[in-house]
Image: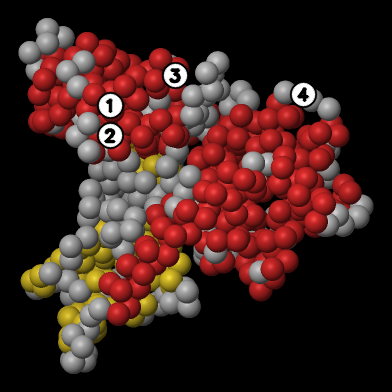
């Protein structure tokens, strides 16, 4: 079994409220853990809870496929076949090589419907390019229609731009305007294959042929135009203001995480209260709680405040814009789902604004606060609420803090964060050892045009040294740097694999490699491809290595 569709920089879960209030984010990982331990019947029992409480339509393709593998291994063949038939017929699952060679599915090869399913998958693979082009066309023009209908009402300017690329995992790019050597079947969507490492596999603003493009991965086209709008907002915003995009170091500190989780909980409670159309005074009380916890956190770590506000202005407003202009039927439920997802992250240093931006934006809109004042400024949500709504400072007292804690699940959050603190310290010790104490391979970047894509949920801060990424890919945009690298797909695991990048992005540190053959360097969890003119040199008696330019 493999998660074969996604090179994740961000993990997206579909969470739907139901009568039994089953928590997908708890049950699914629990089922997968049983699978990894080889306890297939236990894994199937847990996955059955998901099947009983969620429609197939509300579960991602990767997770459904994993469920089929679990049921097959547990010898519950009928359920496994039912899931795979749905994927082939309704999701156009097309990875024929994988499904026919996956050993997890051996138990169902003699089932009568197996041949029919694999034939459908083979046909899906054959028709996939045409279907994908049609889907891209549909989704791009759906987003364009939304943005032309908005026509600047939200932010004063039309967000749509033809500088958008949809990137497939075969390195095919699709866009609405002709590119050099591009093809077209309808003079509407143009496409071409680009070489590996031309673009990073992430939803982000990226340079292509000297121009800034909004890049959206093909597997993010089913989110009601949210991601397309999010990335196009960045293209517009960057024309107005330069903002910090680096992680906020202190948010991995034990006390900061606890305050932020309490803020998340208060925001979820406020959004849920709005969604249930309850009394406005209850909503205000919960918003005050959220901003009280924010005030406590930011007051202690004042030196980070400006950078925190900047990244929240960047990613928070982009995510809010994607949510508010999307076709999601219930924006409040979606915002709660987003907080739940980001709260599950190993680190909060980078993911937090994706949760707080939509939440505060929706709440401020509900309270009719005139908070959007253009794209040439930063947005401090605490200050906005105090000056434009309360007309006073948030009250801070021991009694007030205690009441806010009682309303927002403090006891459970406190216990969980104490446990996490112990585990986190062990992970930091492990990374400190392999990336700072033991011999390593390092390289210094020549310029700032070196791009990287990473799983923001799989990072951790090494104080004063940099950020460890458990899954990352580096792309040499200028061709002046040492080359390209990536962690090895399938071997990335937080607390095991890791590459250290200094905070300003000038230096990269790898664990010592296993093999160096010409321009190929291989470590246990990473691979590097050197550009011509670069080599590896031993730099001291400790055994440290460095990638340097060859002397002429």
Q: Secondary structure at mark 2?
A: helix
The residues bearing labels 3 and 2 have C-alpha atoms spaced at a distance of 20 Å
Q: Which mark is residue 34?
A: 2
Which comes before the other along the chain, label 3 or label 4? 3
Which is closer to the viewer, label 4 or label 2?
2
The residues bearing labels 4 and 2 have C-alpha atoms spaced at a distance of 40 Å
Q: Secondary structure at mark 4?
A: loop
Q: Which residue is mark 4?
A: 277
Quadrant, the N terminus: top left
Circle 1 crowding by C-alpha within 10 Å: few under 14, some 14–19, many from 20: some
Color scheme of the displayed model: secondary structure
Q: Which residue is mark 3?
A: 54
The residues bearing labels 3 and 4 have C-alpha atoms spaced at a distance of 25 Å
The residues bearing labels 4 and 1 have C-alpha atoms spaced at a distance of 40 Å
Residue 185: x and y in percent read 32, 30
The residues bearing labels 3 and 1 have C-alpha atoms spaced at a distance of 19 Å
Which comes before the other along the chain, label 4 or label 2? 2
Which is closer to the viewer, label 3 or label 2?
2
Which comes before the other along the chain, label 4 or label 1? 1
Residue located 32% across and 67% down the image: 430
Residue 321: x and y in percent read 63, 42
Q: Are marks 3 and 2 in contact (CB under 8 Å)?
A: no
């Amino acid at each position: 079994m493999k998660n074969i569709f996604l090179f994740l920089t961000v993990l997206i879960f579909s969470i739907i409220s139901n009568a039994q209030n089953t928590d997908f984010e708890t049950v699914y990982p629990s089922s997968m853990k049983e699978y990894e331990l080889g306890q297939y019947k236990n894994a199937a029992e847990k996955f059955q809870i998901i099947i009983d409480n969620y429609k197939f339509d509300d579960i991602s393709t990767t997770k459904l496929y994993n469920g089929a593998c679990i049921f097959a291994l547990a010898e519950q063949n009928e359920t496994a076949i039912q899931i795979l038939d749905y994927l082939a017929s309704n999701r156009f699952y097309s990875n024929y090589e994988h499904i026919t060679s996956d050993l997890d599915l051996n138990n169902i090869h003699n089932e009568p419907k197996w041949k029919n399913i694999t034939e459908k998958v083979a046909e899906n693979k054959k028709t996939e390019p045409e279907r994908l082009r049609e889907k891209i066309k549909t989704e791009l023009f759906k987003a364009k229609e939304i943005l032309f209908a908005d026509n600047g009402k939200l932010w004063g300017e039309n967000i749509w731009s033809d500088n958008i690329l949809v990137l497939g995992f075969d390195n095919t790019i699709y866009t609405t305007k002709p590119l050099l050597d591009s093809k077209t079947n309808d003079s509407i969507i143009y496409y071409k294959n680009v070489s590996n490492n031309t673009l990073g596999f992430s939803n982000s603003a990226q340079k292509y042929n000297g121009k800034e493009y909004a890049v959206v991965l093909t597997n993010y086209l089913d989110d009601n135009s949210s991601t397309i709008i999010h990335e196009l907002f960045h293209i517009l915003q960057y024309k107005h203001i330069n903002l910090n995009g680096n992680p906020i170091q202190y948010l991995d500190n034990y006390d900061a995480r606890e305050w932020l989780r309490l803020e998340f909980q208060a925001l979820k409670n406020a959004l849920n209260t709005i969604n249930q159309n309850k009394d406005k005074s209850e909503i205000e009380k919960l918003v005050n709680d959220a901003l009280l916890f924010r005030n406590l956190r930011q007051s202690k770590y004042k030196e980070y405040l400006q950078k925190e506000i900047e990244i929240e202005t960047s990613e928070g407003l982009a995510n809010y814009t994607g949510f508010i202009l999307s076709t999601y039927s219930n924006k409040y439920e979606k915002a709660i789902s987003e907080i739940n997802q980001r709260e599950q992250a190993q680190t909060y240093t980078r993911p937090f604004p994706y949760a707080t931006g939509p939440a505060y934006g929706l709440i401020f809109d509900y309270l009719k606060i005139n908070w959007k004042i253009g794209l040439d400024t930063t947005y401090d949500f605490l200050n906005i609420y105090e000056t434009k709504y309360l007309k006073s400072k948030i009250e801070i007292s021991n009694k007030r803090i205690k009441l806010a804690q009682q309303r927002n699940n403090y006891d459970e959050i406190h216990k969980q964060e104490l446990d996490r603190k112990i585990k986190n310290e062990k992970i930091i010790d492990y990374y400190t050892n392999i990336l700072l104490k033991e011999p390593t391979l390092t390289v210094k970047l020549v310029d700032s045009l070196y791009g990287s894509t990473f799983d923001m949920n799989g990072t951790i801060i090494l104080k004063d040294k940099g950020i460890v990424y458990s899954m990352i890919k580096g792309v040499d945009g200028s061709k002046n740097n040492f080359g390209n690298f990536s962690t090895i797909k399938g071997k990335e695991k937080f607390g095991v694999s890791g590459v250290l990048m200094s905070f300003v992005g000038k230096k990269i540190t790898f664990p010592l490699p296993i093999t160096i053959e010409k321009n190929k360097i291989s470590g246990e969890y990473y691979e590097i491809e050197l550009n011509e003119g670069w080599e590896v040199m031993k730099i001291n008696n400790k055994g440290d290595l460095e990638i340097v330019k060859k002397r002429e």
